[in-house]
Amino acid sequence: MDHREKDKEYRENFYRAILSLETLDECDAFFQDVCTIKEFNDLIRRLEVAKMLSNGKVFNEISKETGMSSTTISRVNKCLNYGPGGYRMVLDRLENK
């Protein structure tokens, strides 16, 4: 098995691990174990950035509120507009709950 196939297998195992989580407490414990504090904070803030962009907030407002760099905000914006749709799917689902 080559490196790309192994990476795909690892990624799928990681996704299965996430899908096995049943409660907010389980999610919190898993992500605190698997991420550094900075990685975890960056992940949770990126979703908030996506939400703010979807609600029409501008980069300066978002940066001030979240502390995220304009580079990160731009990347999230690019994903929202041209990515595979993960942010949009999650935001729609959260809005409908």
Image (tube, grey):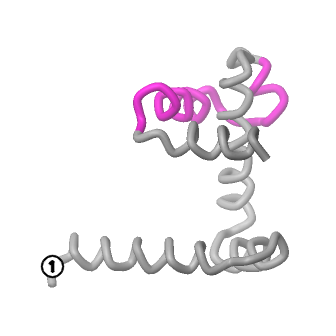
Dominant SS type (magenta): helix
Image x and y of residue 45, in percent: 73, 45
Q: Neighbour class for label 1 at 10 Å: few (<14), some, many (≥20)?
A: few
Image location (x, y in percent) of residue 72: 58, 35
Residue located at (68% from left, 78% from top): 21
- Residue 34 drawn above or below residue 68: below
Residue marked by disc 1: 2
- Is residue 91 found inside the magenta-colored segment of the image? no
Where 67 sits versus 21, above or below? above
Q: Residue at x 41, y 29 (%)?
A: 82
Q: Which residue is at a point 61% across and 30% down the rendered structure image?
A: 73
Q: Quadrant of the N terminus?
A: bottom left
Quick one: 45 or 93, which is closer to the camera?
93
Q: Is residue 79 left or right of residue 6?
A: right
In the image, residue 77 lies at what x, y percent?
55, 27
- Residue farthest to the left, as pictured: 2
Picture residue at 15% right of the left edge, 79% below the top:
2
Q: Indicate yes or no whether the magenta region holds residue 78.
A: yes
Q: Secondary structure at mark 1?
A: loop
What residue range appears in magenta?
A: 61-83
Give the x, y percent position of residue 78: 47, 28
